[in-house]
Image (cartoon, rainbow, N blue to C red):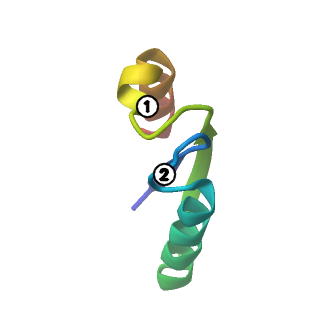
Amino acid sequence: MKRTYIRCMQDQTAVPSTGAAIVADMNAAWPSSPTDLVDIEASHEVMFAKPVELANLLVKAA
């Protein structure tokens, strides 16, 4: 199953290093199906701050 984690680089709730750790844990758990890590310059509420950019990332990940 394809997975993508979109990491918000200005997030103060789930800081970027936490996102990297989550992806590392997921990749360790499922090494045959790695999770893609994609960065966006936005805060935690990315769907309000950058809706078009987020939508483009979601379409690309699908």
Q: Using the image as rendered, state which of residue 48 and residue 62 is in the foreground.
A: 48
Q: Please, what is the three-letter code of the amino acid marked with disc 1?
A: Val
SS at mark 2 in the image: strand
* Location of the C terminus (image quadrant): top left
Which residue corresponds to mark 1? 46
Residue at image point 55% right, 32% down: 42
Q: Is residue 33 visible?
A: no
Looking at the image, tell me whether mark 2 or mark 1 is earlier in sequence order. Answer: 2
- The residue where tag 2 is placed is 4
Q: How many numbered dots are placed on residues in this image?
A: 2
Query: Which residue is found at the position 51% from the left and 21% from the top?
Result: 53
Question: Could you tell me residue 3's position as x and y percent?
Answer: 44, 56
Instruction: Check disc 1: other Cα within 10 Å, few if <14, some if 14-19, many if 20+.
Output: some
Up/down of 22 relative to 49, above or below: below
**Toward the viewer: 37 or 46?**
46
Residue lying at the far front of the rendered structure: 12
Q: Quadrant of the N terminus?
A: bottom left
Residue drawn at the location 37% of the way across and 27% of the way down: 47
As displayed, is residue 15 above or below residue 51? Answer: below
Q: Amino acid at mark 2?
A: Thr
At x 59%, y 40%, the residue is: 10
Residue 39 quadrant = top right
Out of 30 and 16, give the one closest to the viewer: 16
Q: Position of residue 60 (x, y in %)?
A: 51, 32
